[in-house]
Amino acid sequence: MFDVHGFEMTIFKLLIGIILIVLHLRLTGKQQTTQMTPIDFIGNFILGGIIGGVIYNHAISFAEYVSFLLVTFAIISGLNYAMSKFMPTRSLVMGKAYRIIENGRFTEDVLTSEDNKIDPVELLAELRGMGIFSLSEVHFLQREANGSLTVRKKGEGRVNYVLVSNGQAVADNLELAHRDEDWLRGELKQAGIGELDDLFLVELDAAGQLNIVDQEGQTTSVRISGSNAQEVTTVTEFQAPQERSATLEDVIPEDARADAAESDG
């Protein structure tokens, strides 16, 4: 005999599960699949298993069902938080970016490493999809941690690297940029920038600048030149040093500024 009460409870559990998943996605801001991490995808499989297994099992109470979902949400959120705050965890979960072609030649890692083996047919198909029909056009090619390709054709500028994210040095990108954390801290210190914990983002761009965003959203660009880092400007948008607007210090002679300071005193 058809159990109307059991059917209604099954539908109710299903609706609650869907609502909680939608709320979770809204709260985390991950409403597009491109925003999701491997942890999110694994978590979604687990949530689907919980919902699919529990809604037909009337031995599990509604309170237990909701508790299972909430605990799963908490674990997913905790793992994502750890991944965003601790770079080793991020590398473990997301993997590492690696170079396929550098200076127009395939790297040794791609040719010899078992971890970074590539399928030439699939690689060329991806390049064709990006409008590149010959390897002879490629100067630099990198497989990013999210699986996408970064390509620089011959004659184009260099690649940018994020060196600091949420106060944490990104060791993998420092290595790809042929730098290390000691170098980064030295450049920031010479530019008068605070500790890494105070920074939201640091980017090394193709022009040889460090583009820095602190935790309050203020942006600063500094040029790197050997052991000297010269602060360029504090701006709301990144500018090349030669494009910065003139300041009073640029147009008023030093002796005139000194006389003005004495008169103010």
Image (cartoon, helix red, strand yellow):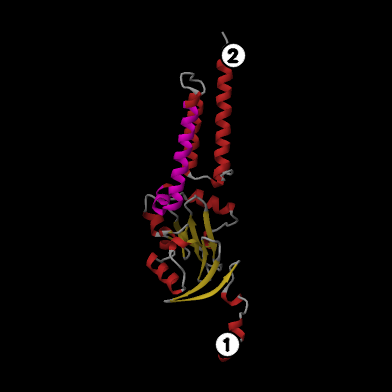
Residue 252 visible in the snapshot:
yes
Q: Quadrant of the C terminus?
A: bottom right
Residue at left offset 49%, top offset 40%: 41
Q: In percent of the image, x 61 and y 80: which residue is there? A: 247
Left or right of residue 126, residue 229 in this image = left
* Callout 1 amino acid: Arg
Q: Is residue 243 above or below residue 115?
A: below
Amino acid on which disc 2 is placed: Val
| Circle 2 crowding by C-alpha within 10 Å: few under 14, some 14–19, many from 20 | few
Which part of the image, by quadrant, shows the N terminus?
top right
From the viewer's perspective, is residue 168 above or below residue 256? above
Q: Which residues are the magenta region?
A: 64-92
Measuring from the top left, give residue 129's x and y in whole percent: 59, 51
Q: Residue furthest front?
A: 265
Relative image position of residue 211 (x, y in whole percent): 52, 67
Q: Residue at x 53, y 70 (%)?
A: 221
Quadrant in which residue 9 is drawn: top right
Q: Say which residue label 1 marks.
A: 257
Q: Which mark is residue 4?
A: 2
The quarter of the picture where residue 28 lies is top right
Can residue 105 be seen here? The reply is: no
What kind of element bears circle 2? helix
